[in-house]
Amino acid sequence: MSDFASAWAELAAIGRTPAGYFRWAWSDGELACRSWFTAAAAARGMSVETDGNGNLWAWLGANDANAVVTGSHFDSVPGGGGFDGPLGIVSAFLALDVLRERGVTPSRPIGIVAFAEEEGSRFGVACLGSRLLCGELDPARALALRDRDGVPLAEAAGLDPAGIGPDPKRLAGIDAFVELHIEQGRALADGAGAPVGVACAIWPHGRWRLDFAGEGNHAGTTRMADRRDPMLTFAYAVLAANKAARLRDARATVGRVAVSPNATNAVPASVTAWLDARAADQSTLDGLVDDVLAKVAERAARDGTAMSATVESLSAETGFDAGLRNRIVELLGGPPVLATGAGHDAGVLAAHVPTAMLFVRNPTGVSHAPGEHATDEDCAAGVAALADVLTDLACR
């Protein structure tokens, strides 16, 4: 079997810093990963293309119909871990090597895809490339997106604005999509001790931008009673979200904030923050967000500030194709089946093509941070499992 450690080492240094990985979409680090993808495909005799939405595809055989596709993404959150996304792409190429070693010949095309801007760290919309592919994001909205430096999406990605949007022909040519990903949690590590699991569902989740407006003023001369400080309302919102999530066994996180004018000796004039909320079912998620927004609006009235909320992305609960999932579970000898609170491109494709996910054990349970980890042995087990799935779906 192909050596996972050697292949992984080729990517491991790209975008790595002492503070974690920085591979924002179409940054130098992510572009270097794309170059690696092209070289890996060429070494295996695969054709390569980039679609109108910036997704990168490699094909073994024609890509017109009946294809089995696997892959993931290269981009990371700021300071993220090395496995989130790239593990699925490296494993896909190695799984093809296993097929060759086994002497099996695919009877249908096999594709490997690197989706663009899965994390949403640069342009704010998670699973951007897959959403555009599937027609779940208005092209006009995509063209209006700017990164934190004001660079438009089409310019950053080098895309033709006229080509951004749904790609129904490409989507119709996919018979099945299987994404391998590191588990972003400890279910496998704490459970049956299996190195590989199969996903059954993705929790509903979303991102809300919260804008707090107040009155900028002097930190030394403005009496506390006279202040309209949006930072107070923002701080209350963080605490309210934390409490609401804990009461519901859900998840709520405020991990990004921008303050204006961001001066040490000034009362802020405005604060913008982003709430990430997730729950096991839609009603729980709705209740969490409604509770937080109602309480923060009440607090804003007391603080003399204003608060508005804008939905930036919202994904309903996603159940993966039961037939495909059960087929894979039987094929792999009954691995653990688990739901996840993390979003994935597979969750977007699931509404359009039969889709499944494999998870590789993460002994630390850490993700989106440098502590994310998987052993070479577990990753090799993931490659073997993916090779079994591709053999079953594309070689018989």
Image: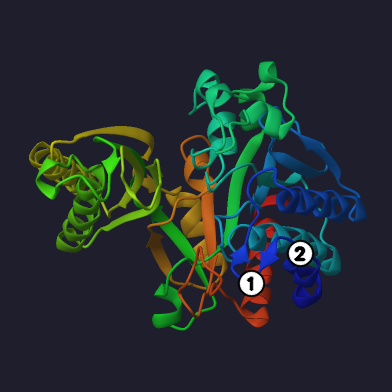
Can residue 320 be seen at all in this image of the molecule?
yes
| Residue type marked 2 | Leu
Disc 1 to disc 2, how far (Cα)?
Answer: 16 Å
Asked whether, in this view, residue 5 is left or right of residue 367, the answer is right
Question: Toward the viewer: 227 or 248?
Answer: 227
Q: Residue 163 placed where, x, y %? A: 69, 20
Q: Residues within 10 Å of mark 1 (few under 14, many from 20)?
A: few
**Badge 2 local density, few (<14 within 10 Å), some, or many (20+)?**
some
Identify the colour scheme used: rainbow
Left or right side of 294 for 329: right
- Depth check, front residue: 357 or 224: 224
Mark 2 element type: helix
**Which of the 4 image quarters holds residue 95?**
bottom right
Amino acid type of the residue tagged 1 in the rendering: Pro
The answer to whether residue 109 of the structure is visible from this angle is no
- Numbered badge on residue 18: 1
Q: Quadrant of residue 154?
A: top right
Please give the label number shown on residue 153.
Answer: none
Residue placed most toward the observer, 148 or 42:
148
Q: Residue 299's spot in the image, x, y percent?
A: 11, 43
Q: Position of residue 4 (x, y in %)?
A: 75, 74
Residue at 66%, 59% in the rendered image: 86
x and y percentages locating residue 118 in the rendered image: 56, 46
Question: In the rendered view of the protein, which quadrant contains the N terminus?
Answer: bottom right
Q: Which residue is mark 2?
A: 11
State the count of labels. Answer: 2
Task: Give the SS element for disc 1.
Answer: loop
Between residue 124 and residue 333, name the one nearer to us: 124
Q: Earlier in the sequence, mark 1 or mark 2?
A: 2
Image height check: is 325 above or below 122? below
